[in-house]
Amino acid sequence: MLAALPLSAIPAEDEALRPAIRAFLAEHVPQIPPERRARSWMGFDAGFSRALGGQGWLGLTFPEEYGGAGRGPFARYVLVEELLAAGAPVSAHWIADRQSGPLILRFGTEAQRRFHLPRICRGESFFCIGMSEPDTGSDLASVSTRAVREAGGWRLNGAKIWTTNAHHSHYMIALVRSSGTAQDRHKGLSQFIIDLSLPGVRISPIRDLAGDAHFSEVVFEDVLLPEDALVGEEGAGWAQVNAELAFERSGPERVLSSAVLLDEWIGWLRAGAADAASTALLGRLLGHLAVLRAMSVAVTDRLVRGESPVVEAALVKDLGTEFEQAVPALLEDRLGADPAREPPAALLRALAYTSAMAPSYSLRGGTREILRGMIARGMGLR
Amino acid sequence: MTDDLLARAAAELFARHAAPAAVRAIQEGGPADALWAAVEEAGFADALVPEAAGGAGLALSEALPVLLAAGRAAAPLPLGETMLARAALAGAGLEVPPGPIALAEALPGEVPRGRIAAAGPAAWVLLPRPEGGAWLLPADGATREDSSSYGAVLRWASAGNARALPQADWLAAGAFATLAGMAGALERMLEETVRYAGERRQFGRPIAAFQAVQQQISLMTEDVFAARIAAQLAALPGGSGVAGLDTARVAAAKARIGEAASRAAGIAHAVHGAMGITAEVDLHLWTGLLHRGRLRFGAEGHWNAWLGAEFLRGADAESLAFVRARLAPPPLEETTP
Ligand SMILES: Cc1cc2nc3c(=O)[nH]c(=O)nc-3n(C[C@H](O)[C@H](O)[C@H](O)COP(=O)(O)OP(=O)(O)OC[C@H]3O[C@@H](n4cnc5c(N)ncnc54)[C@H](O)[C@@H]3O)c2cc1C
């Protein structure tokens, strides 16, 4: 049985970052129309990411010697909350800052750290994650992209798919098989940092249902990787990937994906559209948001203490994505409750985008069913 | 006493004096004297009364473990209600009378009327007044009207010379006492459901081995964790209500826990199958507490509307800004180790 999460608060020194971030965002973000801001952490703008790097806000948690700010996870928590609440286009640096950088810091060699981390902090080096393949989704251990050892490095063949931002990225960190066969499951998997400009890498963007081309298929044909493309230990890829996933499941991005839509609707309510049913729905959503945020902060506090709250993080993600999906579902009903009333077109465009993409919230980062399986294991049911 | 020690002391007390058989007996109208005496003996009912006035001087958040433990036992006692009423009486410099105090939801009428818990002891009833403030009325001076398990409706011929308490948000106080018990009951119900799923076998396996059952219990786990943290949010001190309660935090927590209660009770019953419908199995002690608690002192509909209106009364443009300012613990100042 899991122990209850103790309530925690964000340290005042990290809260102190908030005003400067808000001021920066007030200057850079409001010009962007709501339906673009609704893209949340899928909105791409390399220039914006470089500007954030210029403020010293990329790699906040990386040590100063690698170009970071040496801050703790709560500093980044505050930053990410503000970015997402504003609907800032963060996707260019998102994966490098959240996942790839910390992975390199933790498992990489000194040379890999010195090479990659400062570039990530300056917003010059963007990363993508190569886990999924055409025949590998939830069953991640079944990856069949293969790296074979050769003199001076590795020869890579296979394909990755649904790779967010592959066509905008400089590097991919991929999970591939480096020994054995698919029957070996978790054994024989390794992670590689793949320079996407190498010969033999072919990237084909895939158009999504909202009309964006934010993810791609990436095919590797006899790509020759140098020796130092391997990150971490050969054969330890499975453990490394799981450490990586735990960190990406409980942050503000699992609660705030629909925040832009919610706040656009609030703006309309404030402009005179608030009736009793809308007011009650607003109260309900605020209550849910408050409880989820408290849970997310509590899990972050565990991470800060060096614990590994894998099951608790799965719990936050499943509950958080349910909330994020409920926002557009409930607002479709609300905004159509009185056919004689005309919601602003920009609000409806933000709703259309969010409603269309909401199903992805409970797919990316592990599907709802997989997360519930993890929770069941934590409860001793399996 | 640290949280843990207090929680353990409360768990032991309720295990001894509020085992399921004792709870059933009280619910059926039997005396609660022994249970209440044990609670008084432990000092729980005076937990929020300042030390100078003879209490333990605990903050709400420190007393929460006791209320969770009472909820886990489904103890039919107005314990949270008495704690809050005594804190308010002591705070107003009024004498604290002996015996349990039930908080009432005020009802309309020519004479003082209100609804208290249907079961459990009450020597006194704290009844909010339409014009603000509250009366402390003797329970044995009341006439009982047509009632239900959701609450006993009591009427007094007049307030007489009842003690009068100053203005306070008593609905929020009652909601807090209720939601804390509900959060405890939810945890116990989850544990019992997990245990049952491991014991009951069908198709040659424990039903816990079926993915459909696992996924349902995972959902329930999420709601129970959400309810617990909601109760902790509501118990944060610093508000202007009774014993430092803040109505906005209580509103969010009562509504969220009400939702959790409805969904989780449904799953618990589904997992228990027909066995859960029997009087003999204890499951209904918790589901009953949850259903009653949902309705008492404002259900989701009431508190969601209140919270939405409160947001619109303010000037925040963003949901997150409101949540940070009104529905979160204050930032943690550097503490010296
Ligand atoms: C917007 C978006 C961005 C993404 N970005 C990336 C990226 O950058 N890099 C990357 O590697 N991947 C990315 N993905 C892929 C994502 O990780 C996968 O979608 C996810 O792992 C699920 O795999 P799948 O889509 O193949 O679904 P499948 O695994 O085929 O699942 C389909 C359905 O079957 C259910 N299912 C599968 N197995 C079980 C089981 N054992 N028990 C019960 N139910 C089961 C699933 O829960 C789901 O409901 C992205 C996906 C989306 C939607």
Image (cartoon, coloured by chain):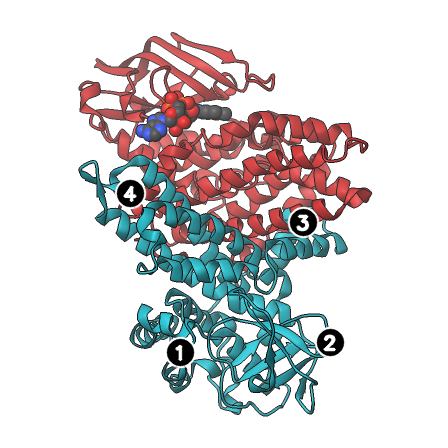
Q: Are marks 3 and 4 on the same chain?
A: yes
| Mark 1 residue element | loop
| Mark 3 residue element | helix
Q: Could you tell whether B313 is left or right of A121 in the image? A: right
Chain identifier matching the red colour in the rendered picture:
A
Residue at the spot of label 4:
A377
**Residue at the spot x=51%, y=13% of the render?**
A206
The amino acid type of the residue labelled 4 equals Arg
Chain identifier matching the cyan colour in the rendered picture:
B
Asked if the residues shown at circle 3 and circle 4 are in contact, with their CB atoms under 8 angstroms apart, the answer is no
Residue at the spot of label 3:
A280
**Residue at the spot x=17%, y=37% of the render?**
B204
Asked if the residues shown at circle 3 and circle 1 are in contact, with their CB atoms under 8 angstroms apart, the answer is no
Residue A347 location (% of width, % of height): 72, 32
The amino acid type of the residue labelled 1 equals Gly
Q: Chain of mark 3?
A: A
Residue B111 location (% of width, % of height): 72, 79
Image quadrant of ligand 1?
top left
Which badge, 2 or 1, comes first in the chain's sequence? 1
Q: Could you tell whether A163 is left or right of A79 in the image? A: left
Mark 4 to mark 1: distance in Å?
A: 42 Å
Residue nearest the viewer, comparing A328 with A62: A328
Residue at the spot of label 2:
B132
Mark 4 to mark 2: distance in Å?
A: 51 Å
Residue B330 location (% of width, % of height): 57, 62
| Mark 2 residue element | loop
Foreground disc of the pair 2, 1:
1
Quadrant of the image for the C terminus of chain A? top left
Q: From what the image shows, is residue A192 above or below residue A321?
A: above
